[in-house]
Image (tube, rainbow, N blue to C red):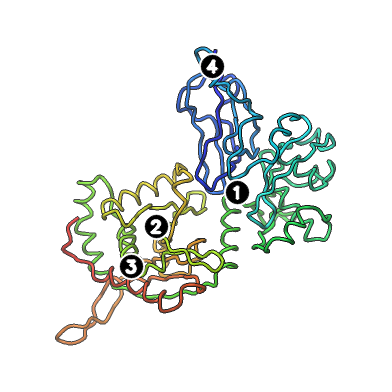
């Protein structure tokens, strides 16, 4: 029998590590190719790890809630056939770390795995990754709680005793202490003036000060002492959303512009073609791909909307990748991306919109599906809202909110004079980064989107 080493796969260029949320298979289970072995979570999306081979799961090398670097061996699968050098090329301790997080002096770490290890973790309030060779002190252990190797190493590096560690509230499974819990506790302790001056503090002082992240230290509590309140701990995705929104408001000075559009012709056109379109393409055509098409045309007219900012540099994006905000059944929000939207016709946009929306709601998105967006659309009209002021999806510089389409009396100009008629009207609102987008650019871009929607060809074939 040969042993196959299952690696944590690469999940996009910007993803260096993932948290093992759940082991779907246990040691001793028989596995077929493509069976899901484990469920993982990154800072971008939840995903599943399928087995590339058939066999028997004989060993899992990490526990649930452990943070694992991309490329690490996470499980051993016994398969039929002769054992080869290729299948057992590297033990788990010797798998090379990804280039995004190189490990200092790997030979020393491998030579004495029982004493030293190298772990990567984020300094609280920054995006900087720190590599440390730390001694795993035997005092960081507990008969009451389980701690992952990463949590133990951080605790040792920060001088946290076993008793202090046991008293930190955990939000993981069965109250387990996660890396996020420990880093939030360190933030809180530092803010109270109780932290010691160590390497982490020195690095924070030497580096440019980033946006401070909110602290989440409350344990999961269902009701308050009085019983008149219910306290709900944020889940992982909601914490990430909260961090991202706070960061965006502190990084970008937000300005919003509004315009009202008469989309009567557009509504009449969709009512005329939607049944035949669905029969022919086996896809429902909603208003979303139509809005995406109008936005893409406007971006081509005003390419400086399709940019990002890095220090004093404006980075213009040649690709037009449209992020579309999608509400999940859990109440959270995710923004899958239509890549190269300018290269798709209306049928292609419809297929892309429906596919991404369905996979988002069924938790089937991959990390690549939500990266590299250059402009975001959020359809608040789905919830009956007529307008809104959305927060920019960093590192983009603008986001469009689409309000509900409502029948309203409107003044119509005709050769015979003005008249009042019932029209299908809607509001479009654009939030933009005033560092690089001024009122003329933002207002002109928004008006151009409205023009494309108002001048829709009611005789158009699709």
Q: Are marks 2 and 3 in contact (CB under 8 Å)?
A: no
Q: Is residue 68 above or below residue 449?
A: above
User: Which quadrant: the C terminus?
Assistant: bottom left
Question: Which is more N-terminal, label 3 or label 2?
Answer: 3
Indicate left or right for 462 with 77 as reference: left
Question: Which is more N-terminal, label 4 or label 2?
Answer: 4
Residue holding disc 1: 236
Residue drawn at point x = 39 percent, y = 66 percent: 402
Identify the secondary structure beneath mark 1. helix
Q: Nearer the viewer, mark 2 or mark 1?
A: 2
Marks 2 and 3, how far apart in space? Answer: 12 Å
Residue holding disc 3: 298
Location of residue 245 by image quarter = bottom right
Residue holding disc 4: 84
Q: Which mark is residue 322?
A: 2
| Any part of residue 383 in sight | no
Indicate left or right for 230 with 189 as reference: left
């Amino acid at each position: 029998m040969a042993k196959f080493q299952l690696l944590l796969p690469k999940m996009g260029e910007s993803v260096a590590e993932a948290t093992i949320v759940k082991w779907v298979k246990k040691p001793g289970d028989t596995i077929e190719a493509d069976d899901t072995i484990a469920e993982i979570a990154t800072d971008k999306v939840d995903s599943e790890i399928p087995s590339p081979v058939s066999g028997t799961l004989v060993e899992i090398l990490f526990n649930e809630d452990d943070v694992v670097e991309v490329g690490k061996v996470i499980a051993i699968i016994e398969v039929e056939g002769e054992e080869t050098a290729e299948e057992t090329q590297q033990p788990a301790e010797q798998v090379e770390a990804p280039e995004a997080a190189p490990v200092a002096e790997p030979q020393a770490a491998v030579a004495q795995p029982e004493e030293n290890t190298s772990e990567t973790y984020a300094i609280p309030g920054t995006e900087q990754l720190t590599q440390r060779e730390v001694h795993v002190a035997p005092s960081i252990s507990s008969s009451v709680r389980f701690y992952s190797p990463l949590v133990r190493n951080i605790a040792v590096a920060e001088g946290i005793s076993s008793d202090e560690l046991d008293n930190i509230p955990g939000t993981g499974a069965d109250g387990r202490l996660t890396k996020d819990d420990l880093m939030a506790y360190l933030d809180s302790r530092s803010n109270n003036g109780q932290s010691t001056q160590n390497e982490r503090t020195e690095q924070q002082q030497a580096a440019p000060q980033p946006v401070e992240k909110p602290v989440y230290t409350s344990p999961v509590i269902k009701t308050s002492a009085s019983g008149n309140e219910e306290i709900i701990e944020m889940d992982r995705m909601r914490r990430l959303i909260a961090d991202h929104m706070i960061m965006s408001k502190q990084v970008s000075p937000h300005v919003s512009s509004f315009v009202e559009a008469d989309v009567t012709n557009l509504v009449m056109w969709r009512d005329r073609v939607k049944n035949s379109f669905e029969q022919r393409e086996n896809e429902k055509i909603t208003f979303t791909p139509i809005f995406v098409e109008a936005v893409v045309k406007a971006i081509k007219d005003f390419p400086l909307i399709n940019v990002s900012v890095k220090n004093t540099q404006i980075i213009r994006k040649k690709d037009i990748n449209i992020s579309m905000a999608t509400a999940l059944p859990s109440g959270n929000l995710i923004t899958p991306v239509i890549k190269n939207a300018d290269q798709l016709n209306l049928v292609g946009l419809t297929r892309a919109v429906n596919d991404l929306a369905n996979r988002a709601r069924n938790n089937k998105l991959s990390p690549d599906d939500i990266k590299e967006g250059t402009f975001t659309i959020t359809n608040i009209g789905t919830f009956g809202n007529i307008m809104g002021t959305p927060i920019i999806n960093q590192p983009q510089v603008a986001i469009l909110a689409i309000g509900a389409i409502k029948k309203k009396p409107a003044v119509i100009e005709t050769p015979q004079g003005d008249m009042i008629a019932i029209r299908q009207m809607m509001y479009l609102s654009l939030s933009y980064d005033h560092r690089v987008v001024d009122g003329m650019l933002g207002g002109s871009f928004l008006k151009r989107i409205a023009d494309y929607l108002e001048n829709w060809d009611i005789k158009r074939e699709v």
